[in-house]
Amino acid sequence: MTGRTAEIAVRCACGSAAVRRVNQFVLHDELWWDAEFSCDACGAHLCEHAGAEPAPDDVRAALLAAHGPVRLRLVGPLPSRLPALKVVREVLSVSLSLARELVEELSREGLEGTAAEMEFLGGRLRRGGVPVDADR
């Protein structure tokens, strides 16, 4: 399991400054995210969410701001784009036409996302026989 964590400054119900810790990681071949809240002033601490599903925009934004994006690219030409199309459609739950656009992006400038998102997509593509590489 690998992943990244970011902290977001928030207000607690008690009025004090608090912290929301968000994480995104690959676990058991699924992309997970979780969030927990803690306030040192009143002692409040709770798990807000944990599950295998796409992270909300605010979680992604915090992770990207804290760690920067990772770019995933195809390594070399593909004899057939079919395996890449299949994986992209399955992992990202997109239409065939959007999958074609995304595979085309993979072959040019690459796709950007959080470290965990690109690790997850890259792993699935490699298992499907599609050579990819990730960089910051």
Image (cartoon, grey):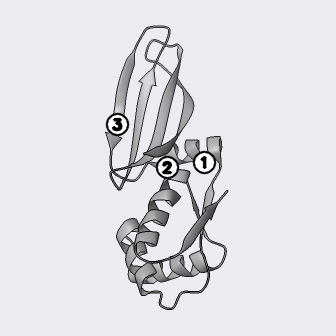
Image point (41%, 82%), residue name: 83
Towards the viewer: 89 or 98: 89
Question: Which residue is nearer to you in this view: 12 or 76?
Answer: 76
Numbered disc in front, either 3 or 2? 3
Task: Say which label, 3 or 2, has the lower sequence index.
Answer: 3
Spatial CA span between label 3 and label 1: 19 Å
- Mark 1, residue position: 64
Whichever of labels 1 and 2 marks the residue nearer the N terminus, that label is 2
The structure residue drawn at horizontal position 48% and vertical position 83%, both measured from the top left corner, is: 100
Q: Is residue 104 left or right of residue 84?
A: right
- Residue 37 is labelled as none
Residue 49 is situated, as x and y percent measured from the top left of the image, at 34, 36
* x then y, percent, for residue 109: 67, 73
Three-letter amino acid code at the position of disc 2: Asp
Task: From the top left corner, tell me how far across and down residue 92 is, in percent.
Answer: 41, 67
Give the Cα distance between marks 3 and 2.
14 Å
Q: Is residue 115 above or below residue 8?
A: below
SS label for mark 3: strand
* Residue that label 2 marks: 57
In this rendering, position of residue 128 left or right of residue 63: left
For this orientation, the residue located farthest to the bottom is: 79
Verify CB contact (< 8 Å) between mark 3 and mark 1. no
Q: Amino acid at mark 3?
A: His
Mark 1 → mark 2, Cα distance in angstroms: 10 Å
**How many C-alpha atoms fall within 10 Å of the one at disc 3: few (<14), some, or many (≥20)?**
few
Q: Amino acid at mark 1?
A: Leu
- Position above or below: 49 against 130: above
Which badge, 3 or 1, is on the more N-terminal residue?
Answer: 3
The residue carrying mark 3 is 49
* Residue at x-position 43% and y-position 17%: 13
